[in-house]
Image (cartoon, rainbow, N blue to C red):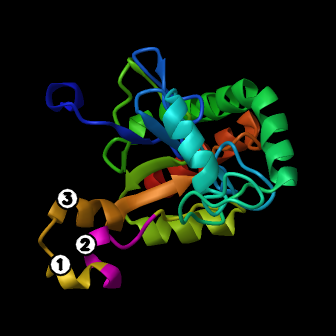
Amino acid sequence: IANKHDLAVIEDACPAVGAKVNGKFAGTFGKINAFSMHPLKPLNVWGDGGMITTDDDDIAEWLLKYRNHGMVDRDHIAFWGVNCRLQPVQAIVGSRLLDTMEELVESRIRNARLLDKGLKSLEDFVVIPQRPESYREVFQLYQVCVQRREELISYLEERGIEPKVHYPIPLHLQEAAKELGHKLGDFPVSEKQADEILTLPAHQHVTPEQIEYTIKAIRSFYLS
């Protein structure tokens, strides 16, 4: 579509470092590509941060100025920009993480596959998203849709497992979107997913043994 209409693509690749579509890395599709280094993202720093990638020299030069008040040097301002400089210590942390990023991503993929396999037989209670073969997902979050979500959350928490809900309120029902005039029932698919979606622990610090424990607990909840 962008090529047809001569449009520039701005890609939101915030949670997708290491992800691929048809062998092409996320963050390489757009003219400008944004990544987040928030603590909840796979590539995270000690506080907060982010980065933008581009293969356009003019855009890169503009961004370097824009993030630093539009300054060309200490004494000259080319245009009004913002204060959006990544702190050096955060850049060091992020750079070091990049060295082990592939290992980190593979551990998340491993855990997600274990969960997929272990929960597959619970299809009447747990809906696993489709996994297209042409996609390499990096699983910032491992999410499924489940029946009796609140009961399941309590059951898992009692057994030392920490599920989360990301996110319980659809965008069109948020206070910030009130002026758009949408009401409950306008987007039934989104609302149903918001009522059923559940995140299970599957990050790189979770071991295969812990994944198996989670699977057994969920199976016990639905089948006992």
Under circle 3, the secondary element is: helix
Q: Please report the residue visible at 38 percent of the width from the left and 18 percent of the height from the top.
A: 134
Q: Distance between the residues labelled 3 and 1?
A: 18 Å
User: Which residue corresponds to mark 3?
Assistant: 189
- In this rendering, would 161 be left or right of 13? right
Establish if 149 lies above or below 93: below
Q: How far apart are marks 1 and 2 (CA)?
A: 8 Å
Which mark is first along the chain, 2 or 1?
2
Residue 201 shows in this picture? no
Q: Which amino acid, mark 2?
A: His
User: What mark, if any, has residue 40 been given in the picture?
Assistant: none
Residue 175 shows in this picture? yes
- In this rendering, would 5 be left or right of 213? left
Q: Which amino acid, mark 1?
A: Leu
Magenta stretch in the rendered image: 167-176
Crowd class of label 1 (few under 14; some 14 to 19; many from 20; radius 10 Å): few
User: What mark, if any, has residue 172 been given in the picture?
Assistant: 2
Q: Please report the residue visible at 41 percent of the width from the left and 35 percent of the height from the top.
A: 121
- In this rendering, would 218 be left or right of 174? right
* Between 224 and 128, the one nearer to me in the picture: 128
Report the residue that reaches farthest toward the front.
76
In magenta segment, residue 174: yes
User: Which residue corresponds to mark 1?
Assistant: 180
Under circle 2, the secondary element is: helix
Q: Which amino acid, mark 3?
A: Val
3 vs 1, front mark:
1
Q: Is the Cβ of the residue at disc 3 closer than 8 Å to that at disc 1?
A: no
Q: How far apart are marks 2 and 3 (CA)?
A: 12 Å
In magenta segment, residue 193: no
Q: Please report the residue visible at 64 percent of the width from the left and 67 percent of the height from the top.
A: 157
Q: Is the Cβ of the residue at disc 1 closer than 8 Å to that at disc 2?
A: yes
2 vs 3, front mark:
2
